[in-house]
Image: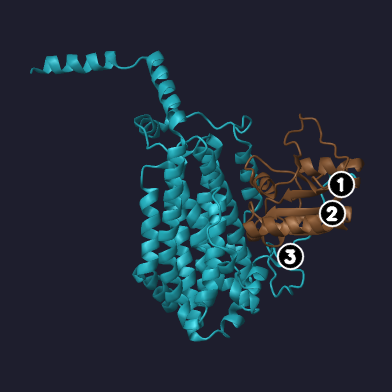
Chain colours: A brown, B cyan
């Protein structure tokens, strides 16, 4: 919540040890929770509306495009219920696979794929994503 | 000195040489020293040199004990992405090649010869020069995969040439590549760093090559593809572009692991070095681009693509993008040719029968989903 009592869009994200997605999320300056990297960690539970930010590492036909940790998180119906949209990170070099994890999640969960970001994003990406998150939360 | 004495001293040397225990201790000490120096931006140490000379003492690679998960993840990705030019039906482009003007054909030949030169360097010098700096045995293995794929890329341009051009045209293009000052200059700049003594600077040079220097060349097949020309060739180039992204990502990631270990002052130094090397390469690349593309009026369009990719190269190294969005607004047709799904309205030109085509990816489902 902001000082004026307005709800702020919160973010749930996944990022591997290379940390590009984490770096992008940091730049957004919003409350954000990271999906655990290792199965040994306690699973994340989300009870409020959020937007999911998810990387695609590229290659192949989309099989394996959504990180297993993210699938596990979304398999939880309570987590899925609060999902409002998805943003993908990746690289246009991956061709049709660019941000494909975002396409898969958007289709399966019936939420909009709000934006694609390359690597850890430019200042323009930060601005556009923040605008879209604010617009989504005003709806 | 008599014979007797010489023999005696040779024997003494042997007797005084390191016994098994001492040898192990010496190897351990070397390993510790190499471990500290690896990836930390330090010049090559004497221990590293010894380890290279005695590499028969290096341990057998154990893929069941992974120190860095990224090594296995990238290895798997590279193996899944493996391809060979022989499987791409380039001959379907023969008719399309005939619709290009002689100038356009010459430009295309030169662009691909320039790319061949870069892939040759990366396959035989670049990726190989990174192996002694590897922080894990698995990183070494990944680098051998990268080196081999660069040689596959270099060979794939020859497949295009032999399909589309005459022996004379091919020879002319290769002669041009040895004589073009800007092409030779960029090769020289990069090779200097590969042969230098700083592991992190080598990684910077390698990432800038993989993620920036190729793109003055990659522009053209994407341009042809957006005009429904040489579409099978473009399919093959997309495979190369995909590989380069993984290479740039991985080497950039390994760079960042080493960079983290540096002092603030050392970090500032290597960051300055990175931006100034990029400037040096960019200046040369602008001239190379003008030299190639002025005749067809595409230079300014190509330069936007260069800025865009320079930013991505910096990001692969963990540094902030340099060029503002006002000069990175790449022609949407080029971006669509590169990444068909990202633009929903894009009409993807077919005519290709490659089993490797990545333009038609569908969102295949994983078994792990349970809804």
Tell me: residue B351, above or below residue A117.
below
Task: Pick the quarter of the image with the N terminus of chain A.
Answer: top right
> Pointer 1: residues within 10 angstroms few (<14), some, or many (20+)?
many
- What's the chain of the residue with tag 2? A
What percent of the width, then of the height, locates residue B151?
50, 56
Task: Pick the quarter of the image with the C terminus of chain A.
Answer: bottom right
**Which residue is at 43% across, 42% downward?**
B199
**Which residue is at 36% across, 48% downward?**
B195
Q: Could you tell whether A116 is left or right of B181 in the image?
A: right
Tell me: residue B230, above or below residue A22.
below
Have a look at marks 2 and 3 and say if they share a chain: no
Residue B83 seen anywhere in this rendered image of the structure: yes
- Tell which tag, 2 or 3, sits nearer the viewer: 2
What percent of the width, then of the height, locates residue B55?
42, 32
What percent of the width, then of the height, locates residue B98?
56, 84
Q: Could you tell whether B238 is left or right of A63 in the image?
A: left
Going from the N terminus, do you reach mark 1 or mark 2 first?
1
Residue B371 seen anywhere in this rendered image of the structure: no
Mark 1–mark 2 CB contact (< 8 Å): yes
Q: Residue B341 carries which label?
A: 3
Which is nearer the eye, B128 or A50? A50
How many angstroms separate mark 2 from mark 3 (CA)?
Answer: 27 Å
> Pointer 2: residues within 10 angstroms few (<14), some, or many (20+)?
some
What percent of the width, then of the height, locates residue B189?
37, 57
- What's the chain of the residue with tag 1? A
How many angstroms separate mark 3 from mark 1 (CA)?
Answer: 28 Å
Q: Determine which residue is flagged by label 2.
A: A137
Q: Could you tell whether B83 is left or right of B109 in the image?
A: right
Mark 2–mark 3 CB contact (< 8 Å): no
Q: Residue A49 carries which label?
A: 1
Determine which quarter of the picture holds residue B240: bottom right
Q: What secondary structure is marked by label 2?
A: helix
């Amino acid at each position: 919540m902001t000082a004026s009592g307005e709800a702020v869009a919160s973010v749930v994200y996944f990022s591997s040890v290379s940390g590009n997605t984490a770096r992008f999320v940091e730049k957004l300056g919003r409350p954000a929770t990271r999906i655990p990297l290792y199965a040994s960690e306690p699973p994340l539970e989300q009870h409020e509306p959020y937007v999911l930010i998810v990387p695609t590492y590229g290659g192949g036909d989309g099989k394996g495009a959504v990180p297993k940790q993210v699938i596990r998180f979304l398999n939880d119906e309570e987590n899925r219920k609060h999902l409002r949209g998805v943003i993908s990170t990746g690289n246009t070099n991956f061709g049709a696979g660019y941000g494909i994890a975002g396409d898969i999640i958007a289709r399966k969960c019936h939420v909009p794929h709000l934006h694609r970001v390359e690597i850890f994003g430019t200042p323009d990406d930060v601005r556009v994503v923040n605008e879209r998150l604010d617009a989504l939360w005003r709806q | 000195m008599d014979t007797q004495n010489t023999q005696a001293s040779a024997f003494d040397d042997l007797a005084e040489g390191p016994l098994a225990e001492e040898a192990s201790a010496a190897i351990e000490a070397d390993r510790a020293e190499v471990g500290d120096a690896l990836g930390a931006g330090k010049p090559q140490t004497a221990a590293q040199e010894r380890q290279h000379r005695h590499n028969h003492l290096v341990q057998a690679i154990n893929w069941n004990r992974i120190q860095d998960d990224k090594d296995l993840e990238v290895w798997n990705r590279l193996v899944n992405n493996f391809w060979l030019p022989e499987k791409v039906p380039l001959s379907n482009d023969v008719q399309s090649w005939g619709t290009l003007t002689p100038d356009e054909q010459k430009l295309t030949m030169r662009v691909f010869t320039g790319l061949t030169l870069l892939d040759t360097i990366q396959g035989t010098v670049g990726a190989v020069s990174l192996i002694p700096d590897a922080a894990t045995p698995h990183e070494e293995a990944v680098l051998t995969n990268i080196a081999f794929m660069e040689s596959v890329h270099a060979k794939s341009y020859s497949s295009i040439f032999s399909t589309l051009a005459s022996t004379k045209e091919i020879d002319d293009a290769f002669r041009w590549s040895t004589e073009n000052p800007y092409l030779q200059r960029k090769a020289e700049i990069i090779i200097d760093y590969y042969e230098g003594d700083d592991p992190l600077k080598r990684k910077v040079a390698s990432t800038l090559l993989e993620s920036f220097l190729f793109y003055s060349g990659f522009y053209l097949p994407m341009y042809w593809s957006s005009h429904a020309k040489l579409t099978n060739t473009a399919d093959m180039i997309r495979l190369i572009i995909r590989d380069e992204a993984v290479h740039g990502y991985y080497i950039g990631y390994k760079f960042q692991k080493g960079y983290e270990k540096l002092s603030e002052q050392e970090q500032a130094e290597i960051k300055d070095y990175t931006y100034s090397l990029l400037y040096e390469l960019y200046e040369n690349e602008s001239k190379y681009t003008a030299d190639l593309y002025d005749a067809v009026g595409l230079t300014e369009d190509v330069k936007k693509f260069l800025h865009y990719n320079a930013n991505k190269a910096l990001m692969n190294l963990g540094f902030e993008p340099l060029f503002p969005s006002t000069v990175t607004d790449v022609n949407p047709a080029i971006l669509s040719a590169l990444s068909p799904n990202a633009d929903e309205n894009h009409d993807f030109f077919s005519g290709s029968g490659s089993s490797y085509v990545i333009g038609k990816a569908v969102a295949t489902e994983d078994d792990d989903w349970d809804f």
